[in-house]
Amino acid sequence: NAGVTQTPKFQVLKTGQSMTLQCAQDMNHEYMSWYRQDPGMGLRLIHYSVGAGITDQGEVPNGYNVSRSTTEDFPLRLLSAAPSQTSVYFCASSFSGGGETQYFGPGTRLLVL
Amino acid sequence: EDKVVQSPLSLVVHEGDTVTLNCSYEVTNFRSLLWYKQEKKAPTFLFMLTSSGIEKKSGRLSSILDKKELFSILNITATQTGDSAVYLCAVRNYGQNFVFGPGTRLSVLP
């Protein structure tokens, strides 16, 4: 099993550009989520999904879109990048039963100039 | 609003010391509490706690949950430089989301 994979590992964008951060898992997890991590702030939930076709907003959703067309993939789209979106982004997945931890991808470091 | 608080935010100790990290929470519909270790990459899972008073142990690390007082502690005995990391506490609710605290940055000096 590859676990949770994310691409790219690092990206530089200019203000106003758009891009998609890719996330995939091969563990058949229903629950997938995106977090951003900024210094001293822990992990903040951006969007999450409890299954294919179902997405919802987390704590900091503004400026981001998601979709979940398959169980495996959960891409995060930045519509018009802003310097405030400079961060490290983690994708994570878990089973929905509540008795499991979640597994994290390696992260994407994003710099918006 | 669900909230997780960790203390201290930063801690410096010497090898061989014992440390206790604290996590308190306010979460509706509590399901589980989890501890993660984060070095310069993604968080890695340490413990998941769902019941009060039952200690989870892994080597020099142990953790316990008090659901009445809404807190958990993570103990590390005989610390080593390899224990230097950020330790994250998270709580999962029945809405299935994980709410994270800000983390405790532990530095272990040789």
Image (tube, rainbow, N blue to C red):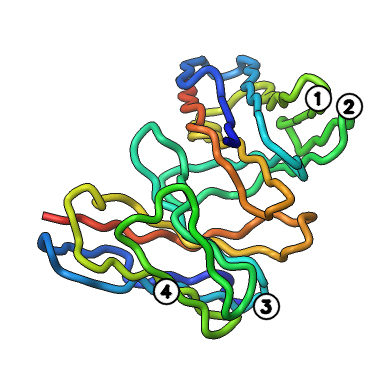
Labelled disc at residue B66: 1
Kindly identify the amino acid type of the residue bearing the numbered disc 1: Asp
Q: Quadrant of residue A98?
A: bottom right
Asked if badge 3 and badge 1 are on a common chain, one would say: no
Residue B105 vs A112, above or below: the answer is above
What kind of element bears circle 3?
loop
Residue A96: percent from left, percent from top? 72, 64
Q: Dot 3: within a 10 Å radius of its alpha carbon, few (fewer than 14), some, or many (20 or more) residues?
A: few
Residue at the location (54% across, 59% down)? A104
Separation of disc 4 and disc 3 at Cα? 16 Å
Residue A65 vs A82, above or below: the answer is below
**Residue on which the image places disc 3:** A28
Separation of disc 3 and disc 1 at Cα? 32 Å
Asked if badge 1 and badge 2 are on a common chain, one would say: yes
What kind of element bears circle 2?
loop
Which chain contains the residue that carries disc 4? A
Residue A82: percent from left, percent from top? 18, 55
Which chain contains the residue that carries disc 1? B
What kind of element bears circle 1?
strand
**Residue on which the image places disc 2:** B53
Asked if badge 1 and badge 4 are on a common chain, one would say: no
Residue at the location (46% across, 16% down)? B12
Tell me if label 1 and label 2 are in contact, CB under 8 Å: yes
Q: Dot 2: within a 10 Å radius of its alpha carbon, few (fewer than 14), some, or many (20 or more) residues?
A: few
Q: Nearer the viewer, residue B102 or B87?
A: B102
Kindly identify the amino acid type of the residue bearing the numbered disc 3: Asn
Separation of disc 1 and disc 2 at Cα? 6 Å
Labelled disc at residue A61: none
**Residue on which the image places disc 4:** A75
Which chain contains the residue that carries disc 3? A
Q: Dot 1: within a 10 Å radius of its alpha carbon, few (fewer than 14), some, or many (20 or more) residues?
A: some
Residue at the location (48% across, 60% down)? A47
